[in-house]
Amino acid sequence: MQNLPRGPGGPQRDYRGGRNDRDGYRDRRDNHYRDYRHSYRGDYYDRQYGRPRNNRPSNGRPHYSDSQPPLHKIPRVSLWDKPAEGFEGVSAARAKACGLFTEPGASSRSTDKSEIQRLLSHATTNYRSSAFQDSKLTPLDSRMAKKLVLTADFAVVRPERVKKYLENFLLTNTIPNVSYDNVKLDLQPTADRNRMIVNTTRSMVATVLFALTGTDVPELNTMLTFDRPNEYVVFDPQDKTVPDEPLDEVIECNQLYAVRNVPFGTPREALVDLLKPFGKLRSLTQLLDKLSYESKGIAFFELLSDDSNVLDRLQELVIDDQELEVIKVCENSKHHYTQSAILSAETLFPTLQSTEKISKHAVSKVVQFINCLPVEDLVDSVRYNDFKVAFETECALHGQFEKVVIPKPPADFRPGMATRPEVGRIYVKFVSEEDASKCVSSLAGRSFNGRTILAAYFDEEDFDSNLL
């Protein structure tokens, strides 16, 4: 039997002829390969790629390190004082009034205020959009009104348990203007392991949770303490009319109080009679159980009083031999920022020119720049780095800074998606308040990336706590 060559699966038949024929074929193939390889290594490669043989890479792959400069050596195109694309044909008078095409280095203080007021009035009377005419802004719409700083012993209790406890508290109580979808909370860690930032969806939710400050929770083995951000602005409404009967609603303002330790089942009329001697009672609302509709021991009321010691007097209230505890729930204990005006397209400009209706912000080392960046450009890492370098370079000309923070949208961001309010802003922390003031006066009103920059101070403690 003829010996067949063995393969992986056993003997295999070779149909290419006899042994002598196969050996001759291999010789011819090897000689051809050697000739081809010799010509490839010779002048063929050089003729095809057109460069000397000594510069050819050893692995046969071309490299571009010699032809392309590194990124840090490529000159950057300045983004400062560039008009927005598509607005080149705007008249000079309107451009100057709007501050869109300010001269390089010009401050917004040189803007014609009367012209801006005229343009705003013209827009409100001629623009037919109901959203534009009905748009109003109060401190309750700000992101700081929806944030709280929670302090607890997170070494003995996990943040997830605290979050679940707070959400259950909101779900089991009847809260005005708060639906089931509004009780979802988000806990954000800070540098301090015992402090968390509580993000809510509505300001009313944050106000109700603030009423629990100083409460010792046995099932969590810790005490919950809530604080408002230092950037929190309290609403001081101009309407001071007192109805004949207190309104059954929660009005978030500077005269809103919360009373705790109220005996369960206490009727609303008993609280009204108890609080009326201390001032003008405009509203009173009790937190009721969703199943039994009985009082859960917490009530909110708005009390107008000229007595500066009214809060101390309210601490003496007693119902059925049970001492009540009264606190202010809408208060900025550090800066006492207030706003009494409701901002709209008609009232925006005259209100901002006066400090009577809006408190003036305290000078800080941290400056926030608004209306700087489109959210879509922050997704691109190259564009993001260009924006950051451009701002760092310009800020360094006016003072010494420590850090530049540009919040980014989430990784799954798509055009049209809602983002956090701080996305699109730029925060810069300077070494001193003098450098921060110098940068504010120099950069405010200038054009960056086709946008007019707005500059404002930001609280340093909130910045360090990532309360942006």
Image (cartoon, grey):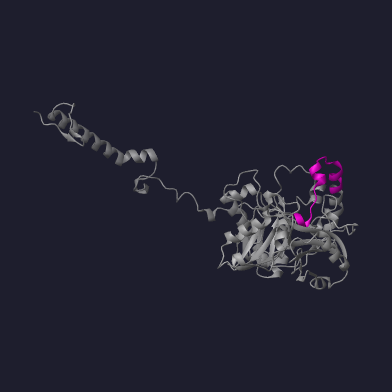
What residue is drawn where x is 66% and y is 47%?
418
| Frontmost residue, 204 versus 215 | 215
Image side of residue 182 versus residue 354, left or right: left
Q: Position of residue 271 (x, y in %)?
A: 82, 63
Residue 355 appears in the rendering:
no
Q: Is 405 situated left or right of 280 in this image? A: left
Quadrant in which the N terminus is drawn: top left
Residue 417 picture location, percent across and down = 64, 45
Viewer-side residue, 131 vs 49: 131
317 or 329: nearer the viewer: 317
- Residue name at image x 86 percent, y 56 percent: 350
To which quarter of the image does residue 406 belong?
bottom right
Q: Which of 303 and 66 is in front in this view?
A: 303
Q: Which region of the structure is painted magenta? A: 120-142
What x and y, as percent, mark residue 443?
72, 59
Q: Give the main secondary structure of the magenta stretch.
A: helix
Going by the image, does 365 lie left or right of 15? right
Q: Does the magenta stretch include residue 139?
A: yes
Does residue 408 appear anywhere in the picture?
A: yes
Residue 143 on image: x %, y %: 71, 56
Q: Does the magenta stretch include residue 127?
A: yes
